[in-house]
């Protein structure tokens, strides 16, 4: 049975999963990895969700304040052996619920064209494409999504 835990970026299970995520992204993004990595630091993230089964951390995700009513979804990852079981959708739903509890009404995120699984996940969970924001404006391999979480 899946257990979701709310924590922060100091959690050692989150740090370990993010290391695996970054290793995967370094391969997928190639030369562009350094550009993206600068925006994906995990220090001081207050809102992290970890997914556990039988005491093992299988996946993670985080949100951080972006604008007064908007949270940005960050660091979504599920171990390859645990994919296809709906874990990422459960983590994402928990993050959206947490954002609502904190009085945020919208979640935004950026993912890459080289991450088709992520694009499918967000579309399946009701996220809509919208113009690339902030540091991702004009970046050809970035795709940005938003969802109202009222």
Image (cartoon, rainbow, N blue to C red):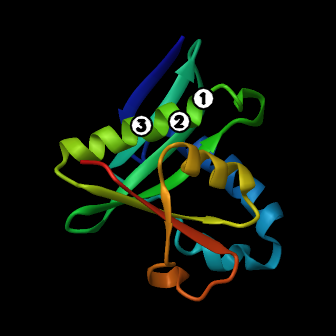
Q: Nearer the viewer, residue 116 or 18?
A: 116
Q: Residue at x 38, y 42 (%)?
A: 95
Q: Residue furthest left?
A: 103
Badge 2 density bin: few <14, some 14–19, many ≥20, Cα 10 Å: some
Task: Find disc 3 in the rendering and name its residue.
Answer: 93
1 and 2 marks in contact (CB < 8 Å)? yes
Is residue 150 found left or right of 96 in the rendered image? left
Residue 88 image position (x, y, % from top left): 57, 37
Q: Nearer the viewer, residue 91 or 131?
A: 131
Q: Which mark is residue 34?
A: none
Q: Which mark is residue 86?
A: 1
The local secondary structure at tag 2 comes to helix
What's the distance in space between the residues labelled 3 and 1, CA to CA? Answer: 11 Å
The local secondary structure at tag 3 comes to helix
Q: Residue at x 55, y 50 (%)?
A: 122
Task: Find disc 2 in the rendering and name its residue.
Answer: 89
What's the distance in space between the residues labelled 3 and 2, CA to CA? Answer: 6 Å
Residue 69 image position (x, y, % from top left): 22, 63
Above or below: residue 78 compared with residue 65: above
Above or below: residue 100 compared with residue 138: above
Residue 111 image position (x, y, % from top left): 61, 63
The local secondary structure at tag 1 comes to loop
Using the rendered view, name the quadrant where residue 22 is placed.
Answer: bottom right
Badge 3 density bin: few <14, some 14–19, many ≥20, Cα 10 Å: some
First reached walking from the N terminus: tag 3 or tag 1: 1
The N terminus lies in quadrant = top right
3 and 2 marks in contact (CB < 8 Å)? yes
Q: Nearer the viewer, residue 62 or 104?
A: 104
Q: Mark yes or no: residue 76 visible.
A: no
Q: Residue at x 20, y 68 (%)?
A: 68
Above or below: residue 37 compared with residue 122: below
Q: Residue at x 59, y 89 (%)?
A: 138
């Amino acid at each position: 049975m899946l257990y979701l835990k709310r924590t922060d970026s100091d959690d050692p299970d989150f740090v370990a999963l993010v290391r695996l995520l970054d290793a995967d992204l370094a391969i997928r993004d190639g030369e562009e990895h350094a550009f993206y990595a600068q925006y994906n630091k995990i220090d001081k993230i207050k809102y992290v969700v970890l997914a556990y089964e039988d005491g093992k951390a299988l996946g993670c995700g985080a949100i951080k304040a972006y604008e007064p009513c908007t949270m940005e979804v960050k660091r979504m990852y599920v171990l390859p052996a645990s994919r296809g079981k709906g874990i990422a959708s459960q983590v994402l739903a928990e993050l959206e619920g947490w954002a609502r509890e904190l009085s945020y009404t919208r979640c935004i995120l950026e993912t890459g064209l080289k991450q088709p699984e992520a694009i499918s996940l967000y579309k399946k969970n009701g996220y809509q494409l919208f113009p690339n924001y902030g540091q991702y404006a004009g970046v050809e391999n970035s795709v940005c999504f938003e969802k109202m979480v009222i």
